[in-house]
Amino acid sequence: MTSTAAAYDLIQVRSSRLWALVHFSFTRWLFPARMVADHVGISTSVIRFWLTPWQRTDEHLPMSHIAEVTHSRGLIWDQISVESSGGLNPFVIPGLPKGQARYFVERVRERLNETGANRLDKQAPRPG
């Protein structure tokens, strides 16, 4: 895969710094939460406390294990939640700009539908 195709394949969204200011979250203002999707899966990077930025939580979920991508719309900011097929510990990123959240969810759902269609094609019995 070329670097241009890899860059096109990457979709990233991060929480708004204005949202962090309104919610008095100094950590989110300094280090916005990020969610990245590519053809392999979805990854999050969240720093919990501003004094210890080296202690962050990086999580990854393969596309084959994603059960649901939920887009919760708010008045000003949105929230994305990605649930695994196991049902434990969903990835949740609040305070996202509306346009970025909508674009992210649409593209991830397209990829999920593509991978689901590919799996069904492989599992379908061949007439013979």
Image (cartoon, rainbow, N blue to C red):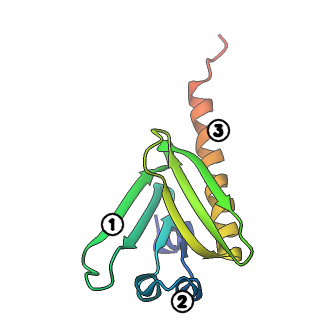
- Which label is found at residue 21? 2
- Based on the displayed image, in which of its 4 quarters is residue 115 positioned? top right
Q: Earlier in the sequence, mark 1 or mark 2?
A: 2
Q: Nearer the viewer, mark 1 or mark 2?
A: 2
Marks 3 and 1 sit apart, C-alpha to C-alpha, by 32 Å
- Based on the displayed image, in which of its 4 quarters is residue 47 positioned? bottom left
Look at mark 1 in the image and give the residue it sits on.
Answer: 57
What residue do we see at 24% from left, 78% from top?
A: 54
Q: Nearer the viewer, mark 3 or mark 1?
A: 1
- SS assignment at label 3: helix
Q: Position of residue 87 (x, y in %)?
A: 48, 41
User: How dense is the environment of label 1, judged by Cα within 10 Å: few (below 14), some, or many (20 and up)?
Assistant: few
The image shows residue 119, relative to residue 10, as above or below, that is above
In terms of depth relative to the viewer, which is nearer, 7 or 22? 22
Q: Position of residue 60 (x, y in %)?
A: 39, 57
Q: Position of residue 5 (x, y in %)?
A: 53, 69
As shown in the figure, which amino acid type bears the numbered disc 1? Thr
